[in-house]
Amino acid sequence: MLGLMQDRPLLISQIIDFAAAYYSDVEIVSRSIEGPIHRYGYRDAHKRSKQLAEALQGLGIKLGDRVGTIAWNTYRHFECYFGISGIGAVLHTINPRLAPEHVAYIANHAEDQIILVDVNLLPIVEGVWDKLTTVKHVVVMTDRAHMPASSKIPNLLCYEELIADKPGTLRWPDFDEKTASSLCYTSGTTGNPKGVLYSHRSTLIHTMMSSNGAVIPMDPDTTVLPVVPMFHANAWGLVYAAPIAGAKLVFPGAKLDGASVYELLDKEQVTLSAGVPTVWLALLDYCAQNKLKMSSVKRTLIGGSAVPISMIARFWNEHGVEVIQGWGMTEMSPLGTTTRFNRGERQLPDAERFAITAKQGRPVFGCEMKIVDDAGNDLPMDGSVSGNMVVRGPWIVKGYMKGDGKSQFGKDDWFATGDVCKIEKDGSVVITDRSKDVIKSGGEWISSIDLENAAMGCPGVAEAAVIGVAHPKWDERPLLIVHPRPGANVTKEQVLEFLQGKIAKWWMPDDVQFVEAIPHGATGKILKTKLREQFKDYKLPTA
Ligand code: ADP
């Protein structure tokens, strides 16, 4: 017997309609690409999203067409999120930090019809223009006064001109909630990037869950600053979740350095921020050097890479900010787990609370997870063993665009994340490593993440990375690579001494190498592939 409730489709347009109706004057504040701060309310954003939708229809965009964006977090990119998906076209967010050949590859693979691009990122499109096979129009997201004087791209369109004479009165169409809404390619650190194609349904379910107080606490008293880019897994869903929670949004534009982020946090009295660890490292250092405090911030959501316990402690001790760690991936919309304190745990002493936050968190309702061995057999979830993490749920990928990467999709919808982890009795997930980064020493596994986190606490260490290096007896042994703080004279002996007692004895790195910079990929993660390449001729002193 079927239930007798309505099947109204879940559509992204409903998010902006809701915010415009009930939070019409709640602000969206942006550091614009042109420079000045721009501010308006959800009502204005709603109208301009519709004007954009009308303009795109005028350019021939129909249900299912892909429209690319190459843009920072600003109000115009926000309008693209709703104007493009609202008419059933697919918002394809392209990461401007990708290598040019990857930008061309994904725009062609996605068959983008139009690309909307920030004026300062236009050189990226110009650089690959000759390779783009499907793009018919390029729209520069600025006004006439800031349009480039010349370009190799013919007939560049100006965003403000394009929407200026549109009425903004369109009625969003109804269509199947399983219609594709947006598209985001994985970083492609190994092989070509793969396209993750979200649907209206998956996005709405993820949004309703993530804006729930137990996951990312948000309400009309919240001011949220997503430093995590809108091209990185939809800014972790915050661009959709903030409007339904009635939260004020603050967009940092192209300036993500410590000073610029601090200025916005302070002036706009931000209460919740979100981003990857590298961004926060810069901000914490900037605050320490200039004796500044983040006075309004209550919480910060950090994910994308493991959060070192030293960072959790600094946020709390120096700024009174509680860290929420999140784990997930582009393929998971992206939320899988977040720090969630059980009853009584908030009252624990600092060190015990920090230890809970240093784990990747507990599962978000709706995302099922388990660990399996290499043959696919279930492993115990009592914290005793690590295994391959597989997940399933209504916002988890079921196949990549055009059938790429088939091997990651298993029986009964279980998707292989490529992460190795432990799952404890209370559901806490502890990521050991990416399966390709784990160090296999004498048949046992060493977690590069644990070693990095421990080393990051050592005075004088700005950033640390660990890779496995070939060893005749043990197969692989860990090499610790350290980027020292400016002016610090930290030595190998000091670092190893610091690690004593903090890690298992046999995990102790066989050597420490110092470098001027640790390479990062397009989403801010340490690029282990590049480090392995850099150290390919290196021989361990113990080998
Ligand atoms: P991106 O999100 O950078 O586009 P991916 O989606 O491939 O790229 O990144 C997801 C991966 O990032 C996860 O599979 C995991 O390895 C890593 N990751 C994300 N969050 C965390 C975290 N909190 N701790 C450890 N690793 C994390």
Image (cartoon, rainbow, N blue to C red):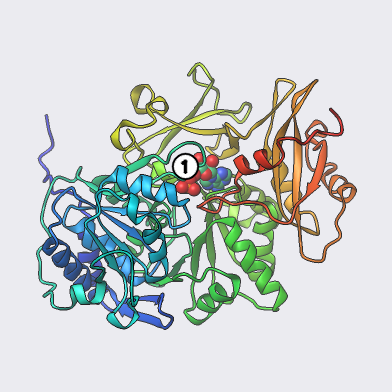
Q: Residue at x 34, y 36 (%)?
A: 400
Is 105 left, or right, of 163 in this rendering?
right
Is 84 left, or right, of 384 in this rendering?
left
Q: Residue 50: x and y, percent?
A: 17, 68
Q: Residue 314: name its quadrant.
A: bottom right
Residue 298, placed above or below residue 216: below
Note whether residue 248 is visible. Answer: no
Q: Residue at x 68, y 68 (%)?
A: 285
Quadrant of the drawing holding the C terminus:
top right
Give the amino acid at mark 1: Gly
Q: Residue 144: x and y, percent?
A: 28, 80
Residue 382, placed above or below residue 206: above
Quadrant of the drawing holding the N terminus:
top left
Is 440 left, or right, of 146 in this rendering?
right
Q: Residue 133: x and y, percent?
A: 27, 48
Residue 397 or residue 480, whichever sits in front: 480
Residue 496, placed above or below residue 318: above
How many numbered marks appear? Answer: 1
> Disc 1 marks which residue?
188
- Badge 1 density bin: few <14, some 14–19, many ≥20, Cα 10 Å: some
